[in-house]
Amino acid sequence: MNDKASTHRGKHLCNAAFKDDVVGAKALLQTLEDEYEKASTVNWVDEETGTSALWVAAWRGSLAMVELCIHAGADVNLSRTKDMATPLFAASQCGHIACVEVILRIQETDTEQAMKGGYTPLLIATANKHLQVVQALLKRGASPDASDEAGICPLFVAAGLGRSDIVKELIDHGASIDQQNKEGWTPLAAACHRQKMNVVRQLILSGASVDAIPSGSWEKRLAKRVRNEIELHRSNDGVGQ
C-alpha cells in the first residue's frame, strides 16, 4: 500500500478531489481492475494534510466525488490524522446535507466517532446551526447526549444559540433535558445566560428543572421568573374555564 505506484495514484486522486475533478478521478479508478489497488488508492492519506480523497470530497461538498470514492471502497471512518475528524464530521461541519446522507447510508458509518476534544458530528452540526444535518444524524441514531471533553452536549449548544428548532429535534429524540456540563451548567442555564427567552420558555415547558441551575446565579433567578409566569398563565387559564 506504501509502494511508489500506490502513492502516485493516491496523490493523483487526492488532487482530483481537491479540484473536484470527478472526470479525472473516475478515469484513474477505471484503470485499476484489482479491488485491492482501488482500495489502497482511495484510502491513501496525504502526509501533509492527513486526509484521504473521501475526506476532501466530504469537506468540499462534492456529492459526485463522495459517491465515487465510496463505490471504489473508501473507508468512511478514515479520519484526518491531525485531529481524528472523519469524513462525516467534515460534511456535518460544513452543512453538506447531501454528502452527509450518502455517508450515513453506509452501514459501517460510525456516527459517534469523535475528533480530538470529543466533538461528534452531531455536536459540530448543532454548533454550526445545520438543522437538516442534525435531523439526518438523529434519524440515523446518533446519540443526542454525546458530549465533548468539557461535558458540553448538543442540547446545551442549541439552547445557548437560541435555536428552538434544533432544541425540539434533540428533545424529540430523547435528549436528557437537564444534562450538566463539567461545571454543573444545564441547557436551561445556557439559554438563560445568553438570554434566549424563547428557548428558556421552551425548555421549562418541556420539563427542564429550574432547580438544576447553580444556586445564587442570576440565570436561576431569570429561570424562576419565567417559570412563575408560566404557572401564573396556567392558573389563569384554569380559572377562566
Image (spheres, grey):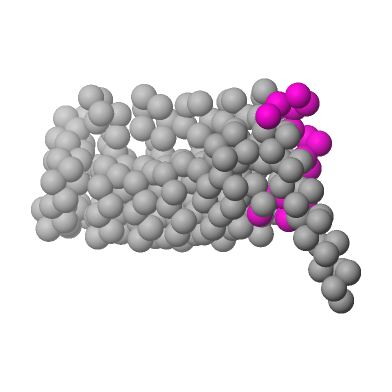
In this rendering, the answer to whether 148 lies above or below 43 is above
Seen in the image, is 138 located left or right of residue 91? Answer: right
Magenta stretch encompasses residue 215: yes
Q: Which residues are magenta?
A: 202-218
Question: Looking at the rendering, which quadrant does residue 235 occupy?
Answer: bottom right
Residue closest to the eye, 197 or 134: 197
Residue drawn at point x = 76 percent, y = 41 percent = 224
Residue drawn at point x = 71 percent, y = 47 percent = 226
Residue closest to the eye, 85 or 148: 148
In this rendering, the answer to whether 75 lies above or below 65 is above
Q: Is residue 2 visible?
A: no
Seen in the image, is 95 located left or right of residue 127? Answer: left
Question: Looking at the rendering, which quadrant does residue 209 occupy?
Answer: top right
Residue 137, image x, y percentages: 52, 54
Residue 207, image x, y percentages: 77, 51
Magenta stretch encompasses residue 110: no
Quarter of the N terminus within the rendering: top left
Residue closest to the eye, 2 or 81: 81
Quarter of the C terminus within the rendering: bottom right
Residue drawn at point x = 71 percent, y = 26 percent = 217
Question: Looking at the rendering, which quadrant does residue 27 occupy?
Answer: bottom left
Residue 216, image x, y percentages: 76, 24
Q: Is residue 200 visible?
A: yes
In this rendering, the answer to whether 155 lies above or below 100 is above
